[in-house]
Amino acid sequence: MAEQIIINGIDKEAKYQELVPQLTGLVMGEDDIIANMANLSAGLAMVFDWLWIGFYLVKDSVLVLGPFQGPIACTRIAYNKGVCGKAWSSKQVQIVPNVDLFAGHIACSSLAKSEIVLPLINSAGEVWAVLDIDSVELNTFDEIDAKYLRQVTELLIKRD
């Protein structure tokens, strides 16, 4: 198993293009979803200077904190509450350029300024988890992030 991620790309898309195959190799052959979430969070954290990267899992009709990298986080998030809850209820990627302008934003950290959340949807069409990423910078995330982070989440979807 790889012990480090090697990235030579300078721009965001080039970094993702190098990172996704390495993350694929990292989780290949491992069936434990929590282990894979932990390694995917760590791999993303090694490459990108984001505040918080992690997963929430749907349990008993609430999002419950899963593996993550970053400061202490909210433990539970209700359906349709905050950016994570909105991604869960809408089944759509949420890109928030400025969290202060998102009605109902849950401030787990006052340092977070922008956010992206991707729902993980199983073969039955149900959201079973979300990938949540926060940045200390405004306007950090865009469609490039959504495209490649979707590829990262699909590494887990194929194992659900």
Image (cartoon, helix red, strand yellow):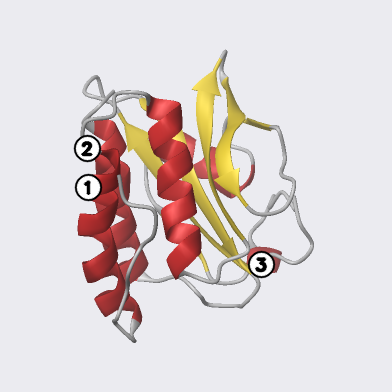
Mark 3 vs 2, N-terminal side:
2
SS label for mark 3? helix
The percent position of residue 158, horizontal first and vertical second, equals: 21, 31
**What x and y, as percent, mark residue 102?**
63, 60
Image height of 39 relative to 14, above or below: above
Q: 10 Å neighbourhood of mark 3: few (<14), some, or many (≥20)?
A: few
Estimate the x, y position of residue 81 in percent, counting from the top left.
Answer: 63, 39
Identify the disc placed on residue 28.
2
Rendered position, 154 above or below 157: below
Element marked by disc 1:
helix
Q: In this view, does 53 lie above or below 137?
A: above
Of the residues shown, which amino acid type is indicated by label 2? Met
Question: Which numbered dot is residue 25?
Answer: 1
Q: Which residue is drawn at 29% across and 39% down?
A: 27
Q: Are marks 3 and 2 in contact (CB under 8 Å)?
A: no
Residue type, label 1: Gly
Question: Quadrant location of the C terminus?
Answer: top left
Residue displayed at 40% across by 40% down: 119
User: In the figure, is residue 88 to the left or right of 21?
Assistant: right
Task: Residue 95: tell me if it is visible.
Answer: no
Q: Can I make out residue 65 in this image?
A: yes
Q: Residue 101 carries which label?
A: 3
Residue at image location 38% in from the left, 36% down from the top:
36
Q: Residues within 10 Å of mark 1 (few under 14, many from 20)?
A: few
